[in-house]
Amino acid sequence: KKMEGKQLLPHGAVEKILFCVDISQEMTDTNMLIKTRPKPLARYVVIEHLIKMFVQFKHLMNKNHQYGLLHMKNSAELALNFTKDASKFQTNLGFEPKSDYKTFDMSSVFDEFFKLADKDVNIEEERIKSNQKPNFTFRIIMIYGRSNVLPELREKKSYQRFINSPICFIDNIYLHKKPGKDSMPQQIYDFLNEFESESHRNFYNYETHSQLKEVYNAFNNLLANPLQRLPQEEADNLSKKNEK
């Protein structure tokens, strides 16, 4: 029986997942708290660990899933090309933030995405198939970690192409400081939420100041294929129910 409101994917349907990770200095902040550890962890340490776990689980689901990596500096830069070799991706994943980047051009994320995606898949053809059963879905999982740098969408061509494709998704995890004189996390979070508003699709958006459990739950919920998963509020409620 077909699930109401959900799209059944063909056996072996592949996800191409592009992680976009902030490597600004703020990602070294040691404010990720969990009850079972006496000391808080640095953000980038937590994110590296959770990406490796995520890739391991996705690889078990389908060994043809592919993973790539962008580093977020003043703009997005390619760090690892798409590969279905999960072990190789995990080995080469390491990153350590060193610089304090003062700006971020969000349009560069979509530009870099299409440079990779257009190499081996015709997204427009897959878009036509999406009304039936697409062979691919594309997803950006973005981890943004700046509290005082509001991203800018300087060029909208690639962004509009991404937003208009029903097989392209972007999920966001926003790690930030508390609101204050030198931080504006609410404005940044609102900016990241606009992607879902403009696309009218089921993107997931998470944010936290210091709760490691929230980041774990986010990665757990992101394991589901975006064409088949629950709306975020329902997925979050289910996670909370399972914790009890």
Image: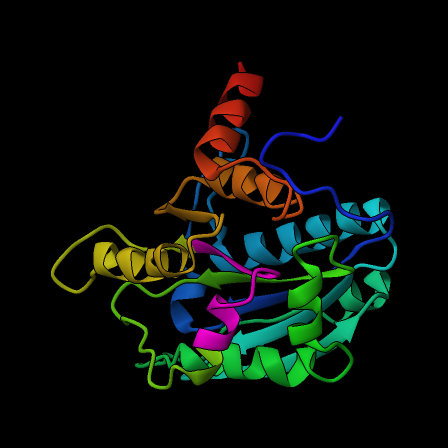
Residue 51: name its quadrant. Answer: bottom right
Q: Is residue 224 left or right of residue 42?
A: right
Q: Which residues are magenta?
A: 160-173
Residue 86: name its quadrant. Answer: bottom right
The mark total stands at 0
Q: Give percent across and percent down for residue 118.
A: 69, 82
Reply yes or no: does residue 20 show up in magenta. Answer: no
Q: Quick check: can you spot residue 6?
A: yes
For the residue pair 41 and 3, the one nearer the viewer reads as: 3
Q: Is residue 183 left or right of residue 79?
A: left
Reply yes or no: does residue 168 show up in magenta. Answer: yes
| Residue at x-position 71% and y-position 55% | 52
| Residue at x-position 51% and y-position 62% | 142
For the residue pair 128 and 8, the one nearer the viewer reads as: 128
Residue 131: name its quadrant. Answer: bottom right
| Residue at x-position 61% and y-position 30% | 4
For the residue pair 57 and 197, the one nearer the viewer reads as: 197
Q: Quick check: can you spot residue 109?
A: no
| Residue at x-position 64% and y-position 75% | 124
Q: Is residue 230 above or below residue 131?
A: above
Which part of the image, by quadrant, shows the N terminus?
Answer: top right
For the residue pair 125 and 34, the one nearer the viewer reads as: 125
Residue extending farthest left: 181
Q: Give percent across and percent down for residue 56.
A: 78, 50
Q: Is residue 12 left or right of residue 138?
A: right
Q: Give percent across and percent down for residue 65.
A: 80, 59
Q: Is residue 202 above or below residue 102?
A: above
Residue extending farthest top: 244
Q: Give percent across and percent down for residue 159.
A: 45, 76
Q: Is residue 223 above or below residue 131?
A: above
